[in-house]
Image (tube, rainbow, N blue to C red):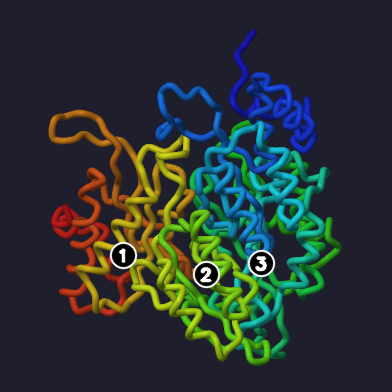
Amino acid sequence: MEKETAAQRVERIKKEKNGLDVLKDIYLYAVLGEKINPEDIDRFKWYGLYTQNRNLQDESDETLYFMLRVKLEHGAMNLEQMREVSALSKEYARGTADFTTRQDIQFHYIQVKDLPEIFRRLNEVGLSTVFAAGDVPRNVITCPVSGIEHDEIYDVRPIVDKVNDYLRGNKNLSNLPRKYKIGISGCHKHCMGHEIQDLSFTAVVCDCTEKILFDVSVGGGLASNKQIAKHIGFVTPSQILPIVKAVSTIYRDHGLRENRRKARLGHLIDEWGIEKFKEEVENRSKITFKEEKTVSYTPYARRQHFGIQDSKEKERSYIGCAINGGHIGAQGLEDLANILEKHGATTIKTTTTQNFVVKDVPTKHAQALADELTTIGVDYKPSPFKARTISCTGLNFCKFAISETKNKAIELASHLEKKFPDFEETVSISVNGCPNSCAHPHIVDIGLLGLKVKNKEGITVPGFELIIGGNLEGEKSSFGEKTKIKFLPEEAESIVENIIQKYIDSGEKNLHKFLKERINDEEFISSLH
């Protein structure tokens, strides 16, 4: 019998048992302690679970540990949720907790025997892991200051609620060809990153009528589906949910399932052509897209909400904060909840760059709260390097990773802060542990992509390749390009330092432009290493 391909195996597994139906098996495994069927391990993803790397695991420890991802709708966590998540992390996850680029939070060292209690306690505070992973609609991303930012184009919170209600645990969408990512935002800084979503809706003001419409873009992605999303027209706010339903079911019914690397929505659009896809969306939704002129979008590096800002809510402010590579930890969550409560705030909203916003601090207490946050390593006026340095899970926990990322991101940002204390232009940096794109290395100014390299002794070890010149800016978007510079982790600081120093010495005022113009300059590239 011919061996089944990876795609055939996954499709068979999903057909034989719906991913959502694995919950009862999780409970049985937890109670009976039996060895887990490898095919059920794949289905565990539907509840946010991935087996983790054994890199930090004692050789004598045969325990099967998991990473557990918790969905944060709107990226929101209140005080009760922060404290419960912190407690769960301390009890079951060795104090680990990291924010992700989809506004979720995830832990490590989770054991199956503890999942019933973890799920129960998450449910009690209104949190869930359902559809946090797997071939399903992932967390809908949105602007963290939606509804409270004075210059926003449109408050999308009610729309996001309706879309979440449709997607949440929807068994009709529990067997998609691959993961499926949606973004909805009315942010005037376009912080959601619509260009790399499978489906996105971005608020714009029409020139002629000043009416609010939403730019609909489809097929964006990174890794195997590395392409900028294609604009297919504009819709009104009330038309967003019907379009979501149409695109979701089209992808379910027609997505390409023969090859896992060619199964994202963008691959279907490439196969059909954008016009056929658009026509099918209009047919299913009974909506005709409106056409408007090209929209200008904020460059990626400037899509941020840091500092103390006046809120739309009376006598309230919000505070945009930066942490290192999304790493918050159990103690950080507990400290954060205590500081917020002390100063009268109740909620944080995570961002797509692994940072967060304190949503609702009384204005009279805003400065005191912001100052106290700095005592736990949270910066409301972050350096240009800490502000936009993101990192993936990395070698310590991810089975696919080649290089360690979390500590390297922290070390890199700290090094650059010390070397360039007066540097003011925001720099976007990614430390990504493998050739996949979980930390978005192709859309930042400076990307470090994990791969194997040879050291001075000729031994193959973990390292990085340098990517430069990425940017998201609507139709002006461009992916960063590989420089062919490959280096050891300990060389990262000097290489990125060289880039920043050469930019300063050039006297130019736009880092992205500076890097794009030099990507094919062999003398410049060779001088970096």
Helix, strand or loop under label 2: loop
Helix, strand or loop under label 1: helix
Q: Which residue is mark 2?
A: 474
In the rendered structure, which amino acid carries the disc numbered 3?
Asn
| CA distance for labels 1 and 3 | 42 Å
Where residue 499 sits in the image (x, y, percent)?
22, 63
Mark 1 and 3 residues: CB-CB less than 8 Å, in contact?
Answer: no
Where residue 224 sits in the image (x, y, percent)?
51, 43
Q: Which residue is mark 3?
A: 78
- Residue 316, placed above or below residue 516: below
| CA distance for labels 1 and 2 | 17 Å
In this view, the mark in front (2 or 3): 3
Where residue 73 sits in the image (x, y, percent)?
69, 61
Q: Which residue is mark 1?
A: 516
Residue 427 visible to an observer of this rendering: yes
In the rendered structure, which amino acid carries the disc numbered 1?
Lys
